[in-house]
């Protein structure tokens, strides 16, 4: 396996959760296939209950000592997608130990308005904020996912992020990025179709990737759990959030209710699983992973 043939530093994993409150969540226009004919159909009371349930899972993990804290940034008027706070940024620890964040360059104008609010938050947390200078589109941790425990990233491109963004990100972070082209519009972000479960295992939908991408993934993971496209689309199970670096090696996962193949994969990898309902957010093309950001 290629991962064993190259020297990678260990990654410092974040232990805090950032969420964005959902009081302004809505569907105004169509940015992905899931938003078709959904405008005006959000039940905000139900959405708020679903968001609060996800928050309660994270607070429980804080109480159990697996996370440090949960922070909430307020949603803003006119930023109906801001609740999906995985997209506006990419935080990382620099080689000098400093907290840094690369700010996203969102594809849609309505989402570009969100980024300054996150920049203000990161500045309050003493991050060094970095703007991409040579890339037109990059949507944060919707499209860039770290390899568990190792200083290596996977970068999705083709729908929301440009491939050349990862060249710039590699220069900024000093960390290599394995670029993966996304070829199916239902999997418009990498976080909808690709879930690293351990240093050796990954869960994914092969319909999201071209043949070259699948070959690359096989070079870095010895064990691949495949989830078919129907389950991935119907349940957003590959938008799960997994935590696999707790002190006592307990593995934690939270995901939308209803999946079968994904649950089997998580159980095979010894995850403790929380299933919740995120149906209101799925109408907008997002679920658990989209609704949080891991920060330092």
Image (cartoon, helix red, strand yellow):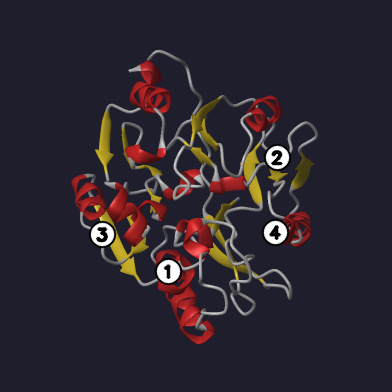
- Residue tagged 4: 111
For the residue pair 206 and 222, the one nearer the viewer reads as 206
- Residue tagged 1: 63
Q: Quadrant of the N terminus?
A: top left
The residues bearing labels 1 and 3 have C-alpha atoms spaced at a distance of: 27 Å
Within 10 Å of the Cα at label 2, are there few (<14), some (14-19), or many (20+) other Cα atoms? few
Q: Earlier in the sequence, mark 1 or mark 2?
A: 1
Tell me the number on the disc at residue 98. Answer: 2
Q: Residue 147: x percent and y percent? A: 45, 35
The residues bearing labels 1 and 2 have C-alpha atoms spaced at a distance of: 27 Å
**Which residue is painted at 25% across and 50% down in the image?**
266
Is 107 positioned to the left or the right of 210 in the image? right
| Quadrant of res 167 | top right
The residues bearing labels 4 and 1 have C-alpha atoms spaced at a distance of: 33 Å
Q: Is residue 250 visible?
A: no
Q: Earlier in the sequence, mark 1 or mark 3?
A: 1
| Quadrant of res 99 | top right
Tell me the number on the disc at residue 259. Answer: 3
**Which residue is painted at 60% across and 50% down in the image?**
296
Q: Earlier in the sequence, mark 3 or mark 2?
A: 2
For the residue pair 48 and 59, the one nearer the viewer reads as 48
Of tags 1 and 3, the one toward the viewer is 3
């Amino acid at each position: 396996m290629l991962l064993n043939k190259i020297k990678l530093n260990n990654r410092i994993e974040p232990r805090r959760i950032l969420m964005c409150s959902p009081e302004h969540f809505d569907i105004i226009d169509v940015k992905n296939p899931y938003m078709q004919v959904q405008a005006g159909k959000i039940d905000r009371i139900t959405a708020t209950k679903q968001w609060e349930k996800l928050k309660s899972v994270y607070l429980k993990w804080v109480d159990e000592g697996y996370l440090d804290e949960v922070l909430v940034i307020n949603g803003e008027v006119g930023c109906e997608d801001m609740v999906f706070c995985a997209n506006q940024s990419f935080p990382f620890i620099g080689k000098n130990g400093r907290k840094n964040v690369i700010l996203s360059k969102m594809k849609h104008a309505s989402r570009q308005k969100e980024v300054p609010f996150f920049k203000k938050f990161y500045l309050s947390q003493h991050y060094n904020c970095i703007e991409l200078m040579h890339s037109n589109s990059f949507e944060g941790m919707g499209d860039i996912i770290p390899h568990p425990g190792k200083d290596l990233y996977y970068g999705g491109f083709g729908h929301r992020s440009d491939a050349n963004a990862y060249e710039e990100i590699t220069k900024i972070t000093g960390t290599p990025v394995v670029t993966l082209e996304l070829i199916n519009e239902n999997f418009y972000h990498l976080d909808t179709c690709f879930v690293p479960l351990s240093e050796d295992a990954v869960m994914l939908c092969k319909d999201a990737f071209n043949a070259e991408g699948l070959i690359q993934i096989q070079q870095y993971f010895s064990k691949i759990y495949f989830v078919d496209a129907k389950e991935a689309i119907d349940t957003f199970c590959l938008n799960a959030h997994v935590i696999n670096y707790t002190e006592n090696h307990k593995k934690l996962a939270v995901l939308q209710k209803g999946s079968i193949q994904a649950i089997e994969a998580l159980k095979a990898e010894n995850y403790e699983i929380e299933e919740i309902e995120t149906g209101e957010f799925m109408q907008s093309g997002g679920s658990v992973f989209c609704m949080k950001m891991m920060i330092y």
